[in-house]
């Protein structure tokens, strides 16, 4: 009786753990299906000239949809515009975020906390709420319908969160390493470029990917600030696949979506090796 009494609670605990594990696995499968089904539809529809909203294996695989969208007007020019806008905006965001985060991380001031709270508040502002005054401002300063003006606003809209991220990553770099460089005569800017940024490579990679992805999928900003069709990025030109009367060429839309996603995937692959790195610099300041 005593042995059964001892085994009963352990068996009950084991069964509860098994039930929780099964419930967690079921939840993960549901989440995975929510991602896999749309991806399967995009891939299969891009190879089917008779594609519709159903996920189905096409009767015959074809590349006609890709041939139809791989033209300068539909794909190449909008993608080039997207690369110029998002690439320029990302570079400007990362540079400004690093320069702004460095004094916040390295120098103590009574204004640091209010400034960081202001940045946090700026990240919560919806972009649609400020587009009307921004549009009026851009008209006044003659930046409307210009690539450089859109790049500036892209960078400004992503800068608050980029500063917040960059500052948190920069706090993980030991200040003692910079102090050693200052002893050797390096300036603060030289220590930032030669010591801090190389050591926080994962942080720079995260800010770069996050900023680029957010700009790459932004439809509203270039739609409002750019007027010339030849300057529209791919995030806006994808709207052309939707007809005025609800008609959609789903196969071509799926093919364009895959091509449109390629630069983001390539960017992640190129810098993914930095994302897995850690700082682990505790031993660098000992001895």
Image (cartoon, grey):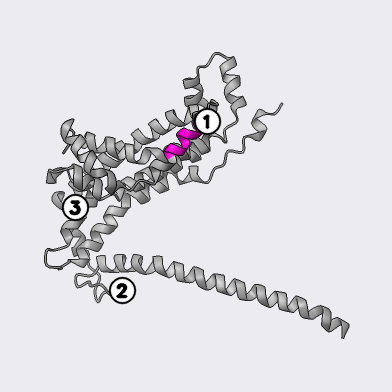
Residue 85 appears left or right of 175: left
| Residue 204 visible here | no
Q: CA distance from mark 2 to mark 3?
A: 25 Å
Point out the tag, 1 or 3, that comes first from the N-terminus: 1
- Residue drawn at point x = 22 percent, y = 45 percent: 222
Specify which label sits upstream in the sequence, 2 or 3: 2
The residue drawn where x is 27% and y is 48% is: 128
Specify the label residue 193 is tagged with: none
Is residue 79 something that shows in the picture?
Answer: yes
Q: Residues within 10 Å of mark 1 (few under 14, many from 20)?
A: some
Label 3 element class: helix
The residue most toward the bottom is: 1
On screen, residue 16 above or below 115: below
Write down the residue under mark 1. Answer: 105
Q: Quote the CA–CA distance across marks 1 and 2.
A: 50 Å
Mark 1 and mark 3: Cα distance apart in space: 41 Å
Residue with the mark numbered 3? 237
The N terminus, quarter of image: bottom right
At 28% from the left and 47% from the top, the residue drawn is: 129
What residue occupies the far top of the structure in this picture?
A: 185
**Mark 2: which secondary structure?**
loop
Question: Dot 2 corresponds to which residue?
Answer: 55
Q: Are marks 1 and 2 in contact (CB under 8 Å)?
A: no
Q: Earlier in the sequence, mark 1 or mark 2?
A: 2
| Residue closer to the observer: 152 or 84 | 152
Where's residue 230, x and y in %? 13, 44
Q: Which residues are magenta?
A: 112-119
Number of callouts in the render? 3
């Amino acid at each position: 009786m005593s042995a059964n009494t001892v085994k009963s609670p352990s068996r009950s605990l084991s069964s509860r753990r098994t039930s929780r594990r099964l419930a967690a696995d079921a939840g993960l499968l549901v989440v995975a299906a929510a991602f896999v089904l749309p991806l399967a539809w995009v891939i299969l529809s891009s190879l089917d000239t008779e594609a519709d909203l159903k996920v189905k294996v096409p009767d015959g695989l074809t590349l006609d949809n890709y041939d139809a969208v791989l033209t300068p007007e539909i794909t190449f020019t909008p993608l080039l515009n997207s690369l110029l806008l998002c690439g320029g905006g990302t570079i400007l965001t990362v540079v400004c975020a690093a320069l702004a985060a460095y004094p916040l991380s390295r120098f103590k001031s009574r204004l640091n906390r209010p400034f960081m709270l202001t940045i946090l508040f700026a990240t919560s502002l919806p972009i649609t709420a400020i587009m009307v005054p921004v549009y009026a401002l851009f008209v006044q300063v003659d930046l409307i319908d210009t690539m450089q003006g859109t790049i500036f606003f892209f960078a400004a809209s992503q800068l608050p969160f980029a500063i917040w991220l960059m500052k948190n990553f920069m706090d993980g770099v030991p200040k003692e390493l910079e102090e050693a460089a200052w002893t050797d005569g390096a300036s603060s800017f030289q220590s930032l470029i030669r010591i801090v940024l190389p050591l926080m490579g994962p942080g720079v990679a995260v800010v770069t990917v996050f900023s680029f992805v957010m700009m790459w999928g932004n439809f509203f900003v270039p739609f409002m600030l750019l007027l010339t069709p030849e300057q529209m990025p791919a995030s806006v030109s994808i709207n052309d696949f939707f007809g005025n009367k609800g008609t959609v060429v789903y196969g071509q839309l799926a093919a364009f979506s895959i091509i449109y996603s390629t630069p983001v995937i390539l960017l992640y692959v190129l810098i993914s090796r930095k994302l897995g790195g850690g700082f682990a610099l505790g031993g660098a300041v000992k001895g």
